[in-house]
Amino acid sequence: MSAAKPPSTEHFKERVLQEWTDPNTVAAWIKWHSKITVASAEAKEALVRAAQVEPGMQVLDIASGTGEPALTLAEMVGPEGHVTATDLGPGMIALAKENAEKAGLTNMTFLQADAHQLPFSDRSFDRVTCRFGVMFFADMPQALGELYRVLKPGGRVAFTAWGPLEQNPFFLTSLAPFLKRVEVSPPLPGAPQAFRFAEAGTLATELQRVGFQEVQEEASTIYWGWPGPPEEVWEHVRDTAVPFHPIIYGLESELRKQAIREAVEGYRGYYDGQKVKCPASIVLAWGAR
């Protein structure tokens, strides 16, 4: 019998598309948008600092989700600048547009777009940003090459990705009770997954490979300050962390209930009565064209 054929890039792209455009996923992000915005503030601020955005700039934000950091970037570039927010799915980008309208931001464009095939001319943007999206690019050289193509000479790209799982109590608190009850195969090499760039230097290497200059990468610890009780943090992770659903729902009912109880109790250790403040390791990387 011949060996099974390894998944193709197209297979990976289709999987990511299904995960992040599923109506249930979109509904979950709508449900939790306001609290995610509060909880993820430190990650957004770190990305914005790395991007060095200035008034009047043309900015492209990839994997904008429900709107951040694109909304903040639009405020920073001001009326003379412009931010183009993109996402794979029409549901997410429609919500981002709605949130921009609520905020009174008029210097923005919203577009359903795939990072692997961007519908923009060469050298269109001063800055390109992507918060927690780069890990899910199915064909890394192709997608990063596209970001390089649309960036102006001297322009800057900036990313955040997740650091190691063992240094991320925000995720580990949820996942550890499941991982000790269900066997999980390691991800395939090159497969899109949340901790793809957890190993130091791996994201910087990918940026250098497609031609970015002055590339830098650093690890940073932030706090994911969820404005609500421990039970709510668990519900949020369950609803929105789509790539982890096979782990969460890979257990039969009673074992899953036990794992959920442990996860909630784990979050209780970070609860101050108002917020669940979990430390989380992130990777920042940036470079210039």
Image: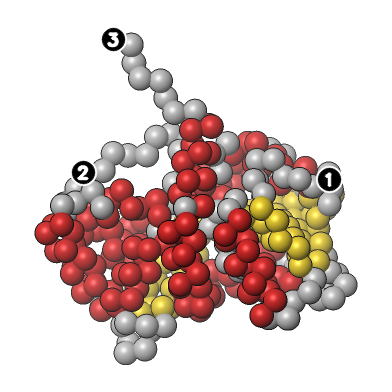
Label 3 packing within 10 angstroms: few (<14), some (14-19), many (20+): few
Label 2 packing within 10 angstroms: few (<14), some (14-19), many (20+): few
Q: Amino acid at mark 2?
A: Glu
Q: Which dot, 2 or 1, sits closer to the camera? A: 1
Number of callouts: 3
Q: CA distance from mark 2 to mark 1?
A: 46 Å
Circle 3: element type: loop
Which residue sits at x=40%, y=54%?
Answer: 242
Farthest residue to the top: give it: 1
Left or right of residue 105: residue 177: left
Q: Which badge, 3 or 1, comes first in the chain's sequence?
A: 3
Tell me if I can see residue 159 in this picture.
no
Q: Marks 3 and 2: in contact by CB < 8 Å? A: no
Farthest residue to the bottom: give it: 273
Query: What residue would you read off at disc 3?
Result: 1
Q: Amino acid at mark 3?
A: Met
x, y percent for residue 77: 79, 72
Q: Which dot, 2 or 3, sits closer to the camera? A: 3
* Residue 169 found in image quarter: bottom left
Q: Which badge, 2 or 1, comes first in the chain's sequence?
A: 1
Tell me if I can see residue 191 in this picture.
yes
Query: What residue would you read off at disc 2?
Result: 183
Q: Which mark is residue 57?
A: none
Q: Is residue 222 above or below residue 252?
A: below
Q: CA distance from mark 2 to mark 3?
A: 26 Å
User: In which quadrant is the N terminus drawn?
Assistant: top left
Tell which of 22 and 272 is nearer to you: 22
Circle 2: element type: loop
Which residue sits at x=32%, y=82%?
Answer: 229
Query: What residue would you read off at disc 1?
Result: 121
Which residue sits at x=44%, y=28%?
Answer: 7
